[in-house]
Amino acid sequence: MNNDMALFMEYLPFLIPLIILQLGLAIFSAIHVIRHPHYRFGNQVMWLLIVLLIQFIGPLIYFVFGRGDHNGRTN
Amino acid sequence: MNQWLGFLKKEWFESVKTYKLLLVLVIFSILGILNPFTAKISPVLFEQFMPEGALVNLPEPTALDSWLQFYKNVPQMGLIVFILLFSTLMSKELEKGTLVILLTKGLRRSTVITTKFFMALCYWTLAITLSFTITYAYTAYYWDQSQLQHLLFAASCLYVFGILLLAVTLWGNTLFATPYGGTLVTLLVVITLFIAAIFPTSANWNPLELLTATTQLLTGELTPLDLWGPYTITLFAAILVVLLTMSHFKRKLL
């Protein structure tokens, strides 16, 4: 157990920024999905799942292909 | 010139508003951190998952392992991410028809292509620098990097190959005016390069050689002089593709 803790501490400099970046991006995109309910295709549940479950490719696909326009037009 | 800067400014605001800056910063930081992390953790993982009593002699990870991860992740994941991100460079405005207004007001068509390409180039520079710096910092902290050769030159090979792919994406995007067109053309070009790489003689000119040779560059088996063929050809091909795109866009009906 002690050994595991030491191992964990050793990788902390990697884990902290990684977790912050990945979670931050996922949460930011999820908020964007909820607050802008217009998409070029698909629905809210689909985009939420994509954004939260697929690491960094999910948010990318949402922002590039899925995000609707600001004026609410769906295409 | 004034027109050029104005359109560049518009491109910059557009890329920030469409979250491209954010995505590039976050994704390439993640890629940068992942490289030394994977190099450091894989021997430990192997040990944990090996059956009890099995003896494996795993060498300690070195700086080379970390950089090998960099030259594996960034060309694959990084380039895919980048091409996807910039695959709507032309098609979005062509589809919506917003470019027509500007063009009828006297904006030169070549300006559109050069500013868009320049903007994408700036982003690619930012992305590579970011992930290179992060990997460099972590690797320097954990390992001794003195035995590595031509580190910067290897990174520049990757950079030049990215420029070629960007130019091809822009061309495909202008040609088909759909986001999928650009990605598809890029994919076809990469597949063609891979097929050409089957023949050993193609190593003298194939741009793909820039990606595969990075390992040998780091260990010192190859020197930058061995790569001047693919290097110059890639640069010239990129310029040629951008010029082609310009002449094509001038004749395109909007």
Image: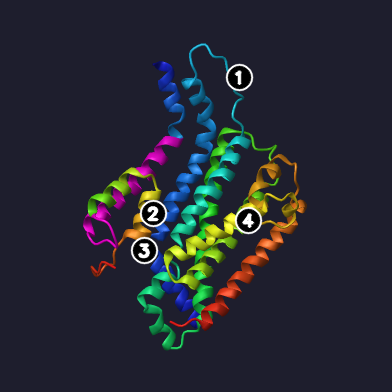
Distance in Å between CA atoms under marks 1 and 2: 40 Å
* Whether residue B41 is situated above or below residue B108 in the rendered picture: above
Is the image coloured rainbow, by chain, by secondary structure, or in one colour? rainbow
* Whether residue B62 is situated above or below residue A53 in the rendered picture: above
Query: Mark 3, residues whose alpha carbon is within 10 Å: few (<14), some, or many (≥20)?
Result: some
How many numbered dots are placed on residues in this image? Answer: 4
Q: Disc 1, disc 2: CB below 8 Å?
A: no
Amino acid at pointer 1: Asn
Distance in Å between CA atoms under marks 1 and 4: 38 Å
Q: Give the x, y percent position of residue A21.
A: 38, 45
Q: Which residue is mark 2?
A: A60
Amino acid at pointer 4: Leu
Same subunit, labels 3 and 2: the answer reads: no
Query: Mark 4, residues whose alpha carbon is within 10 Å: few (<14), some, or many (≥20)?
Result: some
* Whether residue A44 is situated above or below residue B147 in the rendered picture: below
- The chain carrying label 3 is B
Q: Give the x, y percent position of residue A41.
A: 29, 60
The label nearer to you, 1 versus 4, is: 4
Q: Which mark is residue B193?
A: 4
